[in-house]
């Protein structure tokens, strides 16, 4: 069964995890390939300026399929080498594809985001939560370790001590605490979640697309380079932006006291 429902409108692509009967559990054969195809298509489409990731039904994503773990099938079957390859060649493909998106990603967390589901949300640039959302990285309760890159991404979002608390205790926190801890930027009523995400995506999509993608790239590069290298990268990138028509449009619009109309040129 296909995992993703995909729609695009007004420069915004919405990816909806579409397995509501399993709380959008992940890890079935082909899930990684499907995510890679969707994200690759977004990256090469100059018309797409922002992506929203959400879940169908009551949950964002419950993470890995617990029944598949119990029955030792799919990604969770075979010997240790086969299981490791299952992570690399399927589950980790989902994560790499999302991390590799060149346009801003908003996670609209409509319900429980647990384990791998929480990791997916943390890969977004911005997270907006329904007041019904919950977050947890409950791997240790299953006798396994965080196997989806969460030990890299979660501390970068909420700090190492709070990430350690969630990993070591297996606690699940509600939307209010997620907001207090900086895990999400906004909490809204459930019925208003998608409209709120779309409003933010629309604001982002109104920005000049070349500069938008380059700004995300600079943010990502900043995680692993020195300040001097960041300045040099910024200088070279900025020089290119000064030669775009969108830069001229932005300057003209400011001087003329009107809204700019960025074309991606």
Image (cartoon, rainbow, N blue to C red):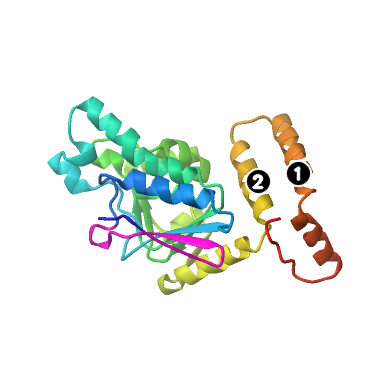
Q: Is 114 on the left-hand or right-hand side of 254?
A: left
The quadrant of the picture occupied by the C terminus is bottom right
Q: Secondary structure at mark 2?
A: helix
**How far across and down, in percent of the image, does residue 106 sit?**
50, 57
Q: For the point 61% across and 47% down, which residue is it?
A: 216
Residue range corresponding to the magenta coloring: 5-23
* Contact, mark 1 vs mark 2 (Cβ under 8 Å): yes
Q: For the point 27% across and 46% down, which residue is it?
A: 64
**Which image quarter: residue 233?**
top right
> Which label was assigned to residue 207?
none
Q: Residues within 10 Å of mark 1 (few under 14, many from 20)?
A: few
Task: Identify which residue, 194 or 127, lies in the foreground.
Answer: 194
- Report the residue marked by disc 1: 240
- Report the residue marked by disc 2: 214
The quadrant of the picture occupied by the N terminus is bottom left
Q: For the point 42% across and 36% down, which residue is it?
A: 151
Q: Residue furthest bottom?
A: 191
């Amino acid at each position: 069964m296909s995992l993703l429902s995909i729609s695009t409108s007004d420069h915004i692509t919405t990816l909806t995890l579409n397995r509501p009967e399993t709380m959008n559990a992940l890890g079935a054969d082909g899930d990684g390939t499907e995510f890679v195809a969707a994200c690759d298509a977004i990256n090469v489409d100059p018309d797409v300026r922002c992506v929203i990731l959400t879940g169908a039904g009551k949950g964002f994503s419950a993470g890995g399929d617990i029944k598949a773990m119990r029955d030792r099938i799919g990604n969770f079957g075979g010997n240790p080498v086969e299981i490791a390859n299952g992570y690399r060649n399927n589950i980790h493909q989902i994560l790499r594809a999302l991390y590799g998106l060149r346009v801003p990603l908003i996670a609209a967390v409509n319900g429980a985001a647990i384990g791998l589901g929480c990791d997916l949300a943390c890969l977004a640039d911005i997270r907006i939560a329904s007041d019904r959302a919950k977050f947890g990285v409950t791997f240790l309760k299953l006798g396994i370790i965080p196997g989806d890159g969460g030990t890299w991404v979660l501390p970068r979002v909420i700090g190492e001590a709070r990430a350690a608390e969630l990993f070591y205790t297996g606690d699940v926190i509600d939307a209010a605490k997620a907001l207090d801890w900086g895990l999400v930027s906004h909490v809204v009523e459930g019925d208003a979640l998608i409209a709120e995400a779309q409003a933010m995506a629309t604001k982002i999509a109104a920005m000049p697309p070349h500069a938008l993608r380059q700004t995300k790239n600079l943010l990502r590069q900043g995680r692993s380079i020195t300040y001097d290298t960041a300045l040099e990268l910024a200088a070279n990138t900025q020089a290119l932006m000064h030669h775009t028509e969108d830069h001229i449009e932005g300057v003209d619009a400011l001087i003329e006291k009107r809204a700019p109309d960025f074309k991606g040129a």
